[in-house]
């Protein structure tokens, strides 16, 4: 391999002739032989070697594919490479060879190892065929790959290494050289390099302006001029986005100043102070920021989700502190009308949450109506929560829903029928979910004839099965003519409709009596859902957290390290019928973690104490830590690792354990970030097919567990069974690595703003519990302030804060303190323990806190910290 990579053909010939020292069946040996025949221009032997090697690799791939796609993938990569080499020998005189090869390479797994295996041999082959420009294009792609994955880059300065190539290729190489310098830490050299290129390369001007602005090396007026010139020269999404992002950065300080003035000044003085000291023209700053973001969307979709989420948050903030809100609303409404409905669909639930804002109601309602007209089947499920709102004190939700339905229905009669029918179906599901009692006997055909399709002709219905896949628009990267000609319907999968539910309804024995209902799809398959009502909780939390998890998945997919490990949260769709009930997509092949452990204990000879017995132990104990470590833990040795031993195939056992460790790490970091509590064994499910963990029931959010009568002292569940199931390395192997990779992605500066923008929807929806008595007139403002405080706590965690650890008991005497009573209570919960920790430091402290036996001994008994 070293010989052909260095184009050392003499050494390669010697190595291949040493038959007794090499394995002729080894792929690298076969690849070296193929490249040698290509070098010697021996066409007959070349085609013969290609054919023989292809047959052998295809045979190996077919055997490996019987086990799993993962095991077969390396063989598929080899077939990909052999196909490229064969194509290259046939098409060497055609133009655009490198572009075709690189386009094919983009179809492979976006990991460094996979793409290196393709690009390396192709570069050598192109060089040997004297296709200099093509070889240099592949070399440039490989250098870009190394930079993005943090690997050493062996690229020489373009002035020498790309001399004699085309002007376009040389310009791309110069641009890449600047990026390599910047990534390696030589930022001043990178800026100097971009400055030299800026006159001939507009992309260099844009990059230089970005980097200089990030380092605060440019005055605002100079930066503004640089971005404006780059926009005029490039006229693409990147130029408009980065200009708007810079203006957004300036606008944040103005919003913060306005917020301070609002809190410190009388209303009559507020406007005078903010105008007198503003260093910018606030009207232009606000309108140009919104216009820039929305015009970026008209030129490309690469940053679609960030822009839309940021716009919604920014619009809310401008209205809250009255920063040119009238000008902002006018600009927003004018530019938003130019954005196609399929783009707005990706934030439809957030638009619905914010649609009651008095300043933004008309703008957001118009967008919702347009989306509903274009995608009625999907949008109707989102609108159900408005139409069936059960809050007696808030009729505005129902009125808004009725206004949307009537307005859309007047324009299209069939849409009126669809939306009205959807509301009636949702009402039936709401009644079904609310049916409780000690002995429930549901005769589906009799009690809910419409749901099983036995109603009158007027009651017949046809709805989209609300699966996650059916409700999600997968929007590719588009620009130019592809964006202008895009059809939003192509971003959804083939529609699966249903006209009835099956008559069998399974009622579960838990307190709320959830029911399992099954839609019969138009494709002949059955799709189960959990129809559930919450007396004290709010299912909108489940829906919002799944949206947040979906955004995290998008960010993880962009990270090479996370992508290489296939890190992704298993999400499911939640249809909000009303604040208290909804339909949850059934996650198949799952079983509660506690039930899995209980089943494993049944196979053991020795019995273990029951939950009441353990509770009695703790009630009589003077030292919970001693009771936990000396009485409870010795009687409950870990057993979860034995579940993986049921796999007959070692490769399946290993794959399940790896996926278990990865999913546990991902949920640990995500759960800590959003303050997810109540992670007992029934709220964590184990996918018995894959080994992946799936979390459910997200009512205990944003540190609510810290405010319980028995505060939760651990940041996430990492008990002895969870550690033992990860194998001999425990938390030190895959688990810690995935925790660090996940936290790196979450804490990335570019991702933090996106995540906070998604969480900002909790300001719009009153989903956070009020922990103290508040006057009715102050309730709305108190909810907003509570949500803002909560999101600021999340922001602290993204900056390296810890909010974990054993309780620090407050002083028992009544000495005076500068802290309020509420703050002194909070201080007992270990708030703000550590600031600005590195990712590795933060992860390490979190793991220590989660596995600390003293912390676990303080958990309430129902959480079962010994499992």
Image (cartoon, rainbow, N blue to C red):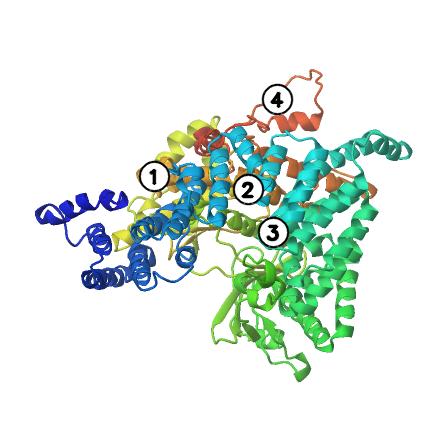
Q: Quadrant of residue 501?
A: bottom right
Which residue is drawn at the image coordinates 62% and 51% (left, top)?
237
State yes or no: discs 4 and 2 in contact (Cβ < 8 Å): no
* Residue found at x 32% / y 63%: 87
Disc 1 versus disc 2: nearer the observer: 2
With respect to residue 628, does 463 lie above or below?
A: below
Is 240 on the left or on the right of 45, as rendered?
right
Q: Is residue 138 above or below residue 792?
A: below
Q: Is residue 721 left or right of residue 518?
A: left
Q: Position of residue 281 (x, y in %)?
A: 80, 38
User: Tag 2: Cα neighbours inside 10 Å, few (<14), some, or many (≥20)?
Assistant: many
Q: Upstream in the sequence, badge 1 or badge 4? A: 1
| Circle nearer the N terminus (4, 2) | 2
- Disc 1 designates what residue? 637
Q: Which residue is mark 2?
A: 677
Q: Quadrant of the C terminus?
A: top left
Residue 24, position in %: x, y?
15, 53
Q: Earlier in the sequence, mark 3 or mark 4?
A: 3
The residues tagged by marks 4 and 2 sit, at their Cα atoms, a distance apart of: 23 Å
Disc 3, SS: helix
View extreme (right): residue: 268
Q: Residue at x 66, y 25 (%)?
A: 824
Q: Which of pointers 1 and 2 lies earlier in the amino acid sequence?
A: 1
Q: Label 4: state its secondary structure.
A: loop
Q: Which of the two marks, 3 or 4, is nearer to us in this view?
A: 3
- Residue underneath mark 3: 305
């Amino acid at each position: 391999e070293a010989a052909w990579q260095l184009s050392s053909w003499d050494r390669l010939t010697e190595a291949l002739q040493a038959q007794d020292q090499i394995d002729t069946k080894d792929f690298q040996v076969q690849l070296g032989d193929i490249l040698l025949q290509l070098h010697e221009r021996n066409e007959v032997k070349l085609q013969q070697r290609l054919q023989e090697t292809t047959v052998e690799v295809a045979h190996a791939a077919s055997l490996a594919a019987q086990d799993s796609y993962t095991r077969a993938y390396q063989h598929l990569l080899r077939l990909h490479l052999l196909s490229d080499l064969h194509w290259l020998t046939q098409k060497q005189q055609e133009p655009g060879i490198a572009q075709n090869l690189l386009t094919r390479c983009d179809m492979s797994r976006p990991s460094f190892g996979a793409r290196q295996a393709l690009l390396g041999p192709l570069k050598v082959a192109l060089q040997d065929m004297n296709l200099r420009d093509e070889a240099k294009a592949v070399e440039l792609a490989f250098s870009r790959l190394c930079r993005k994955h943090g690997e050493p880059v062996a690229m020489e300065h373009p002035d020498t290494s790309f001399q004699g190539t085309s002007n376009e290729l040389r310009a791309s190489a110069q641009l890449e050289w600047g990026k390599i310098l910047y990534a390696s830490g030589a930022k001043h050299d990178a800026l100097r390099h971009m400055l030299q290129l800026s006159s001939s390369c507009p992309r260099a001007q844009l990059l230089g302006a970005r980097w200089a602005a990030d380092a605060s090396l440019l005055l605002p007026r100079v930066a503004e001029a640089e971005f404006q010139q780059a926009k005029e020269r490039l006229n693409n999404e990147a130029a408009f986005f980065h200009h708007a992002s810079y203006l957004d950065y300036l606008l944040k300080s103005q919003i913060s100043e306005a917020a301070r003035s609002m809190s410190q000044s009388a209303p009559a003085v507020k406007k005078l102070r903010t105008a007198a000291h503003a260093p910018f023209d606030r009207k232009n700053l606000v309108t140009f920021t919104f216009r820039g973001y929305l015009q970026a969307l008209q030129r490309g979709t690469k940053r679609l989700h960030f822009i839309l989420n940021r716009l919604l948050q920014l619009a809310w903030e401008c209205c809250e502190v009255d920063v040119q809100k009238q000008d902002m609303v006018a600009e927003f409404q004018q530019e938003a009308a130019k954005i196609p409905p399929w783009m707005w669909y990706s934030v439809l639930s957030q638009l619905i949450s914010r649609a009651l804002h008095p300043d933004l109601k008309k703008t957001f309602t118009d967008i919702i109506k347009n989306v509903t007209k274009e995608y009625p089947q999907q949008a109707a499920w989102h609108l159900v929560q408005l139409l069936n709102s059960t809050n007696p004190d808030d009729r505005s939700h129902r009125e808004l829903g009725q206004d949307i339905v009537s307005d859309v229905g007047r324009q299209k009669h069939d849409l009126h029928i669809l939306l009205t029918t959807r509301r009636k179906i949702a009402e039936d599901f709401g009644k079904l979910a609310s049916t409780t009692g000690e002995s429930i006997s549901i005769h589906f055909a009799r009690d809910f004839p419409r749901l099983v399709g036995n109603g009158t002709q007027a009651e017949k219905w046809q709805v989209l099965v609300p699966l996650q896949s059916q409700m999600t628009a997968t929007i590719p990267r588009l620009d130019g003519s592809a964006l202008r000609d895009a059809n939003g319907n192509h971003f959804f999968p083939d529609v699966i409709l249903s006209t009835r539910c099956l008559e069998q309804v399974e009622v579960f024995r838990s307190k709320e009596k959830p029911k399992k209902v099954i839609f019969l799809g138009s494709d002949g398959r059955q799709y189960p859902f959990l129809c559930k009502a919450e007396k004290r909780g709010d299912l909108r939390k489940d829906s919002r957290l799944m949206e947040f998890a979906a955004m995290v998945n998008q960010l993880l997919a962009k990270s090479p390290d996370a992508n290489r490990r296939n890190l992704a949260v298993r999400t499911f769709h939640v249809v909000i019928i009303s604040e208290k009930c909804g339909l949850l997509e059934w996650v198949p092949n799952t079983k509660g973690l506690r039930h899995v452990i209980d089943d494993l204990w049944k196979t053991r000879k020795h019995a273990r104490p029951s939950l009441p017995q353990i509770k009695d132990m703790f009630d009589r104990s003077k030292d919970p830590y001693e009771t936990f470590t000396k009485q409870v833990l010795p009687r409950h040795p870990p057993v979860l690792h034995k579940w993986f031993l049921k796999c007959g195939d070692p490769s399946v056992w290993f794959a399940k354990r790896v996926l278990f460790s990865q999913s546990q790490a991902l949920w640990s970091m995500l759960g800590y970030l959003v303050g997810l509590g109540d992670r007992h064994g029934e709220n964590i499910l184990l996918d018995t097919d894959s080994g992946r963990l799936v979390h459910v029931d997200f009512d205990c959010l944003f540190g609510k567990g810290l405010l319980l009568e028995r505060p939760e002292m651990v940041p996430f569940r990492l008990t002895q069974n969870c550690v033992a199931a990860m194998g001999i390395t425990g938390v030190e192997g895959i688990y810690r690595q995935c925790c660090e990779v996940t936290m790196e992605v979450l804490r990335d500066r570019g991702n933090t703003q996106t995540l906070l923008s998604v969480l900002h929807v909790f300001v719009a929806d009153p989903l956070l519990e009020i922990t103290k008595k508040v006057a009715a007139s102050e309730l709305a403002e108190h909810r907003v302030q509570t949500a803002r405080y909560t999101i600021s706590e999340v922001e602290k965690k993204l900056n390296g804060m810890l909010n974990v650890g054993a309780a620090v008991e407050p002083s028992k005497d009544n000495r005076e303190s500068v802290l309020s009573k509420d703050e002194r209570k909070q201080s007992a919960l270990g708030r703000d323990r550590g600031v600005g920790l590195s990712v590795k430091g933060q992860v390490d402290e979190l793991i220590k806190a989660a596995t600390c036996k003293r912390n676990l001994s303080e958990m309430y008994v129902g959480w079962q910290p010994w499992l």
